[in-house]
């Protein structure tokens, strides 16, 4: 058993355990912390594949920035424990068959590709130079379109968050000295 | 190099570095108390040892033997985990920092750093960005309004200034063409016209340096950006409910982060271990490390100097400064550097 396989299994176990814990916890902050553990373990898996830049970005962006905002929101709203309910009927009607179909599909895919060779550890060209070449040269147009899409999302959230003025400016009350 | 020797060398280096770092942290605290004392026209610690030099040891013993209070209303798992998170990530980020060139012992080349990662700078950024959780969770799990406000302020401030911090480093990265700290330092060797060293600060990154320094002060929650623990309004901010060794862990994390920031400033902008080398072979071998340590010391002194000089920002000033001034300046620096290098 090579050290790579051991590490792969360890990170994978952390990932799955974190994901299950995310669903099982009732307090939102515990769920958010489990999600951070999942992100960090995924970064470890990327590192094993040789994609060191993607691993670093995974930690900086997801674990470091996005999840901080999640935790920030939970803290700001002071979200308490979730209440347990019996569960909706829609979830039982569609969720259980859905998850069965999904797991059968995943199993079928894995079995179908069982003959092909796995990616060797550290085999992917993941250094920053290659990624920069891909993003800013080979796939420049899709990359720029994505950034415009994000810009539209930001503008939309600004519009939604800013309240329309309730009283027109001209009639705002002003003290006369 | 066989694997057991590699592991042994790494373990020895880690232990040594941890010892050096914690001693440096303890004596940075001593230095701060002394220097700020002199700036305020008093003596600072003088009682324990000559010049109060044994004060850190006395403080350490006191922290260890004080009663470790856990208030009844805290959320215990996170209350205990938060100082651990803060101190662990603060100590981790030092591991990729190179202190000098590689030395050769018994035919093996051993680099003067725990591990030479080729994305070292990204690793430091990642580790510091995860370190926010220590402060944020401490504030939340204490279940205290002052702590919560401190934690909220810390997370908002650190997320805001992290962007400027990252952008201020891009100029250096463009010039060096590498994420490896060793390569960045090696790219700064040599001189302009035989006199001025070819450090990044002298080759056009002066704006990047000031952006970095400002953002880094905000990231380490130091004056003038110490809103998360503003004692005049928040008691002690996020660590109000902490005592004894748990409080000391936050303290150690803050000073270890200061040391990391000073090391990074030295490596990225001030040529790392480059400096004049002269004298016999043994002096030549030691001088690079000496230059590195001397530069780091200067930055730590500046940290303390700024603390003794500047008042605290108001919160809206802090946010406006970060988003409306520092971020555009850092962005402009990136664009200007890119144009200059492409030319």
Image: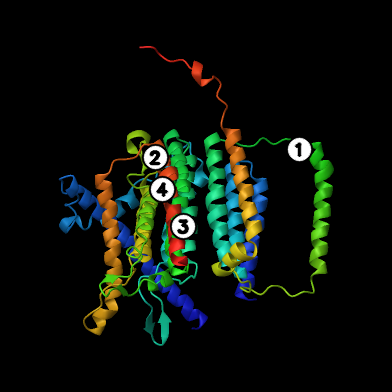
Give the camera-side residue of B40 and A165: A165
Circles 1 and 4: CB distance less than 8 Å?
A: no
Residue bearing mark 1:
A87
CA distance separating discs 2 and 1: 40 Å
Q: Secondary structure at mark 1?
A: loop
Q: Earlier in the sequence, mark 4 or mark 2?
A: 2
Give the camera-side residue of B75 and B274: B274
Q: Position of residue B142 (x, y in %)?
A: 46, 39
Judge if badges 3 and 2 mark residues of a common chain. Answer: yes
Please indicate, yes or no, whether residue A39 appears anywhere in the rendered image: yes
Would residue B63 be found to the left or right of residue A150 on screen?
Answer: left
Which of the colour schemes (rainbow, by chain, secondary structure, one colour) is used? rainbow
Q: Earlier in the sequence, mark 3 or mark 2?
A: 2
Residue bearing mark 2:
B237
Q: Residue at the bottom extreme?
A: B107
Q: Chain of mark 4?
A: B
Residue bearing mark 4:
B326
Q: Secondary structure at mark 2?
A: helix
Q: Chain of mark 1?
A: A
* Residue in view at x 21 percent, y 52 percent: B35
Position of B323 relative to B107 (above/below) = above
């Amino acid at each position: 058993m090579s050290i790579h396989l051991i590490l792969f299994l360890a990170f994978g176990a952390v990932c799955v355990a974190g994901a299950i814990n995310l669903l099982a916890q009732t307090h939102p902050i515990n769920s958010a912390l489990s999600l951070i553990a999942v992100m960090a373990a995924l970064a470890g898996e990327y590192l094993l594949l040789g994609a060191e830049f993607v691993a670093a970005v995974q930690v900086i962006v997801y674990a470091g920035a996005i999840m901080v905002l999640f935790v920030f929101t939970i803290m700001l709203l002071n979200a308490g424990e979730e209440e347990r309910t019996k569960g909706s009927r829609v979830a039982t009607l569609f969720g259980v068959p859905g998850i069965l179909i999904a797991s059968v599909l995943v199993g079928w895919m894995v079995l179908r590709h069982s003959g092909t060779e796995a990616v060797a550890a550290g085999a992917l060209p993941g250094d920053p130079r290659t990624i920069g070449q891909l993003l800013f040269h080979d796939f420049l147009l899709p990359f720029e379109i994505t950034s415009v899409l994000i810009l539209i999302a930001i503008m939309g959230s600004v519009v939604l968050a800013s309240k329309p003025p309730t009283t027109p400016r001209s009639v705002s009350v002003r003290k006369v000295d | 190099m066989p694997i057991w020797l590699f592991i042994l060398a790494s373990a020895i280096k880690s232990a040594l570095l941890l010892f050096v770092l914690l001693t440096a942290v303890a004596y940075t605290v001593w230095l701060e108390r002394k220097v700020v004392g002199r700036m305020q026209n008093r003596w600072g610690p003088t009682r324990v040892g000559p010049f109060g030099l044994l004060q850190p040891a006395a403080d350490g013993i006191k922290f260890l033997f004080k009663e470790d209070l856990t208030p009844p209303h805290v959320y215990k798992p996170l209350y205990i985990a938060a100082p651990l998170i803060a101190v662990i990530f603060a100590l981790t980020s030092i591991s990729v920092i190179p202190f000098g060139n590689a030395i050769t012992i018994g035919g093996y080349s051993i680099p003067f750093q725990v591990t030479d990662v080729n994305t070292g700078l990204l690793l430091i950024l990642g580790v510091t960005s995860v370190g926010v959780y220590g402060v944020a969770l401490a504030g939340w799990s204490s279940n205290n309004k002052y702590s919560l406000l401190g934690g909220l302020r810390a997370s908002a401030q650190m997320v805001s200034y992290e962007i400027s911090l990252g952008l201020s480093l891009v100029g250096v990265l463009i010039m060096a063409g590498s994420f490896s700290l060793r390569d960045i330092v090696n790219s700064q060797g040599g001189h302009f016209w035989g006199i001025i060293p070819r450090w990044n600060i002298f080759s056009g990154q002066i704006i990047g340096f000031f952006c970095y320094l400002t953002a880094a002060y905000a990231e380490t929650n130091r004056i003038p950006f110490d809103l998360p623990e503003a004692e005049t309004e928040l008691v002690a901010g996020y660590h109000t409910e902490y005592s004894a060794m748990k409080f000391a862990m936050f303290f150690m994390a803050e000073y270890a982060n200061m040391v990391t920031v000073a090391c990074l400033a030295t490596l990225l902008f001030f040529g790392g271990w480059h400096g004049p080398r002269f004298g016999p072979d043994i002096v030549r071998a030691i001088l690079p490390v000496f230059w590195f340590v001397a530069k780091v010391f200067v930055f730590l002194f500046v940290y303390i100097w700024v603390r003794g000089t500047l008042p605290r920002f108001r919160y809206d000033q802090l946010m406006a400064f970060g988003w409306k001034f520092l971020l555009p300046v850092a962005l402009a620096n990136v664009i200007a550097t890119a144009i200059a290098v492409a030319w």
